[in-house]
Amino acid sequence: MTAMLASVNSLAEALLVEAAAVDIIDLKQPARGALGALDVAEVAEIVRRLQPGSCVSATIGDLPMQPELVLPAVQAMAATGVNYVKIGFFPGGDWLACVEGLQAIAARGVALVAVLFADTRPDFAMIDALAQAGFRGVMLDTANKQLGSLTRLMTLDELQLFVDRVAGLGLLSGLAGSLRADDVAGLVQLGPDYLGFRGALCREHSRTAQLDVGQIDIIRQHWRALAY
Ligand SMILES: O=C[C@H](O)COP(=O)(O)O
């Protein structure tokens, strides 16, 4: 069954989504960008305060694809004890050098998730290289939140190709990008490992606003409806 990921920006929000039994607690500061990072010390504190069995991911921020920036950021975030470190593959920079460097980190047991951005029209051939480098997962998100949701930028057929390619390589697949409750049914049918949300869970669907637990329930209801 497809899991639910919720992005949260503080200990208080992390505890809220943990209490709401969200499957993956994703630590991120949306005010700092699409994959804005929380400070490493704050992430470490949140990990300490959550239940040991909680599944936690964290982003390293909207960094340019330069190994001298990306690799230390990944190592620092991994040291906090999160289960997954998410790395945004933004246009430009040196992707190859970053992936080569990240391969060594993955080989040391750090679970890496690559985030590709639908609005930058990523080449899905990249997924093979990520698998070879030892990434644990690949997800699609959107970088420019003004351009609309993932489901407006890509067709369900394109998303199915993505999910199948990632799954075919034995990696976790995730879909996110201004998703709303109405997207759940169509996307769950594609069989991704998880769907990720931030804006839809916030007051007035503003991703930098406060989390609203009632919105989590609304998303969950759409999931539950699929079981009948
Ligand atoms: O990883 C999931 C993202 O935080 C999704 O954020 P969004 O729903 O505001 O695009």
Image (cartoon, grey):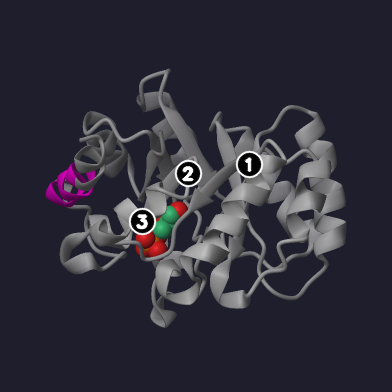
Question: Mark 3 or 1 closer to N-term?
Answer: 1
Q: Which residues are magenta?
A: 214-221
Q: Position of residue 74 (x, y in %)?
A: 67, 45
Q: Where is residue 108, by image quadrant?
A: top right
Task: Name which residue lies at 74% across and 65% down.
Answer: 65
Q: Position of residue 8 (x, y in %)?
A: 35, 48
Q: Residue furthest bottom?
A: 147
Q: Mark 2 sits on what residue?
A: 191
Task: Name which residue lies at 42% across and 18% down.
Answer: 52
Amino acid under disc 1: Ala
**Image quarter of the C terminus:** top left
Amino acid under disc 3: Gly
Ligand 1 image position (quadrant): bottom left
How far apart are the alpha carbons under marks 3 and 2? 10 Å
**Image quarter of the N terminus:** top left
Question: Mark 1 or 2 closer to N-term?
Answer: 1
Task: Name which residue lies at 22% across and 59% down.
Answer: 202
Classified by dominant secondary structure, the portion drawn in magenta counts as helix
Amino acid under disc 2: Gly
Q: Is mark 1 within 8 Å of ligand 1?
A: no
Q: Which mark is residue 167?
A: 1
- Left or right of 211: which side holds 72? right
Q: Is residue 217 magenta?
A: yes
Task: Name which residue lies at 21% across and 47% down.
Answer: 222
- Left or right of 40: which side holds 19? left
- Left or right of 30: which side holds 86? right
Q: Mark 3 sits on what residue?
A: 186
Q: Secondary structure at mark 2?
A: loop
Q: Nearer the viewer, residue 50 or 178?
A: 178
Q: Where is residue 70, by image quadrant?
A: bottom right
